[in-house]
Amino acid sequence: MLMKNNFNDIIFDDSSFFECFDGVDCDKNLFLKNWNNRYAALVHESKIKFNLETMNDWSESDIFFLIPIDSLKSTHINLFLRVSHSSVNVNVHMVSFVRECPEVVLNWSVIMSEGIQNSSVSLLEESIILSDKVKIKNLPLLDICSKNIMASHGAKIYRLDWDKLFYLESKWLDPRKAKWILLSSYVEKLFSWIKLDDREKRQLYEEYFYFF
């Protein structure tokens, strides 16, 4: 089910969640409790601080953010993750489509507490630039206070592959359709994680991806 602008805390207890944030300024708290947690969020024209915290050992979480940016409003996403337990695995993937925006700020901080063992954290942020008037800031921070753990982060800022666009357009696809084919895989990933009915998917397409 699609939850829009839900500001309640979420405790993951063998559950998956999909949320949509549109035009909000808030904090969102996520508590990672059990095995196989999945969380996906669509964030639009918002300033949000996501606070993620582990609750016990032996949990695994996959988290995906999709951020379409197509207006002159600034977008700020701050992600704060605290890992305080052993044998925890957290994977975070954040993708933004930036068509027009004066400033995009995407920050994340990871703290891995002292004394934990065999835990791992992976964060990847991708910004796909679709115009020339964009300012992006990525500020990652890893604070590692323990041994025998793994932590990694990466940030990619790039334009669409023009060779692929040219190839698709050579097959008589108009430029807009060709561009959408290259972007749609991320949208399909968002939808594949969480069960949405056709009406909810169509609603999201029309509201947030029409202009791409």
Image (cartoon, rainbow, N blue to C red):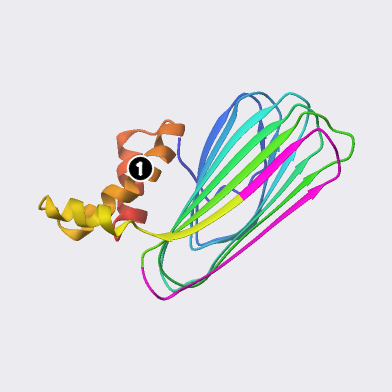
Residue furthest to the left: 172
| Quarter of the image with the C terminus in it | bottom left
| Quarter of the image with the N terminus in it | top left
Element marked by disc 1: helix
Q: Residue at x 44, y 60 (%)?
A: 158
Locate residue 80, reporting x and y percent.
71, 51
Q: Which residues are magenta?
A: 131-153
Q: Main secondary structure of the magenta part?
A: strand
Locate residue 170, reporting x and y percent.
13, 54
- In the rendered image, residue 62 lying in the magenta stretch gets the answer no
Q: Residue at x 86, y 39 (%)?
A: 146
Locate residue 75, reporting x and y percent.
53, 65
Q: Residue at x 10, y 53 (%)?
A: 172
Of residues 134 and 67, which is closer to you in this image? Answer: 134
Looking at the image, residue 46 sits to the left or right of residue 188; the answer is right
Residue identifier under label 1: 185
The relative height of residue 87 versus residue 77 in the rendered view (above or below) is above
Of residues 166 and 209, which is closer to you in this image? Answer: 166
The relative height of residue 132 versus residue 122 in the rendered view (above or below) is below
Of residues 33 and 5, which is closer to you in this image? Answer: 33
